[in-house]
């Protein structure tokens, strides 16, 4: 049958574009909620999962299959950098974007080694963050310019993996015997690694070495 005069047929609905799914890992509840709220205001972005601990990132990502994982670094249970490396192995379709309070050159190097597509500090506007999410989806690498320059001038970490392990184990003031038990090394080997780390960081003792390594993003 023909249409009645003066009446147009109803317009065909166009399918809406799929939104970019984002997983957000941030241990501070207020910050996490604010970021999720602001990102959800973007027409093309949807926060599909929020986690407060690093050891929940990979399992949650495998469950919701996000396009982008937005990860803090210092998280309970596991660092965002360690989770990023596993996430790139388990879910390579997910782009990893590191967002942190601590703009340390060593963190940037470790993030890139873990396969992260971007690294931003938290003091930027949310529009910049939303733009970074879109850019990493296009295959671009997004890095805070000032931090990139600092990383180039700072050079790589002087600490070996074992020296990092020993310093991490010493961070709570543990004895040499406790550290040896944690990292499965002899006490004499632990002392050698601690001495090497102290020398490389230019500090006087193990706790100063821990603080210096953290300050530079080497731990």
Image (spheres, grey):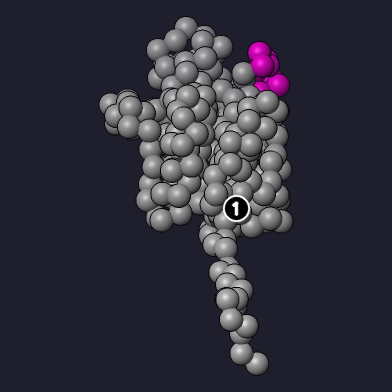
Residue 154 is drawn in which quadrant?
Answer: top left
Compared to 134, does 14 lie above or below? below
Let me know if residue 174 is in the magenta part: yes
Q: Is residue 121 left or right of residue 68?
A: left
Nearer to the camera, 186 or 87: 87
Q: Is residue 88 left or right of residue 128?
A: right
Q: Position of residue 183 (x, y in %)?
A: 64, 32
Nearer to the camera, 168 or 89: 89
Nearer to the camera, 77 or 41: 41
Question: In this orientation, does residue 98 appear?
Answer: yes
Quadrant (top left, top right, bottom left, bottom right) of the N terminus: bottom right
Q: Position of residue 68 (x, y in %)?
A: 55, 50
Q: Residue at x 63, y 36 (%)?
A: 37
Q: Specify start and end residues of the magenta stretch as a single range.
A: 172-179
Residue 178 is drawn in which quadrant?
Answer: top right
Q: Residue at x 68, y 46 (%)?
A: 49
Compared to 79, does 30 lie above or below? above
Q: Residue at x 68, y 55 (%)?
A: 64
For disc 1, the marked residue is 21
Work out which residue is located at the far top of the displayed protein and give it. 204
């Amino acid at each position: 049958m023909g249409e009645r005069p003066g009446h147009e047929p109803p317009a065909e609905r166009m399918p809406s574009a799929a939104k970019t799914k984002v997983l957000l890992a941030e241990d501070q509840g207020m910050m996490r909620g604010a970021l999720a709220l602001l990102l959800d205001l973007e027409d093309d972005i949807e926060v599909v999962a929020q986690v407060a601990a690093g050891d929940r990132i990979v399992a949650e990502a495998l469950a919701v299959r996000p396009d982008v994982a937005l990860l803090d670094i210092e998280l309970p249970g596991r660092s965002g950098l360690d989770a990023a490396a596993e996430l790139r192995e388990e879910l390579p379709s997910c782009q990893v974007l590191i967002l942190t309070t601590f703009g340390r050159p060593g963190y940037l190097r470790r993030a890139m080694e873990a396969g992260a597509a971007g690294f931003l500090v938290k003091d930027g506007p949310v529009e910049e963050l939303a733009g970074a999410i879109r850019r990493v989806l296009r295959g671009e690498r997004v890095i805070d310019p000032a931090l990139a320059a600092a990383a180039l001038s700072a050079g790589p970490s002087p600490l070996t993996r074992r020296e990092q392990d020993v310093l991490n184990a010493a961070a709570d003031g543990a004895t040499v015997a406790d550290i040896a038990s944690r990292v499965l090394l002899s006490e004499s080997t632990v002392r050698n690694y601690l001495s090497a780390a102290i020398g490389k960081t230019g500090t006087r003792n193990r706790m100063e070495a821990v603080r210096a390594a953290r300050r530079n993003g080497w731990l």
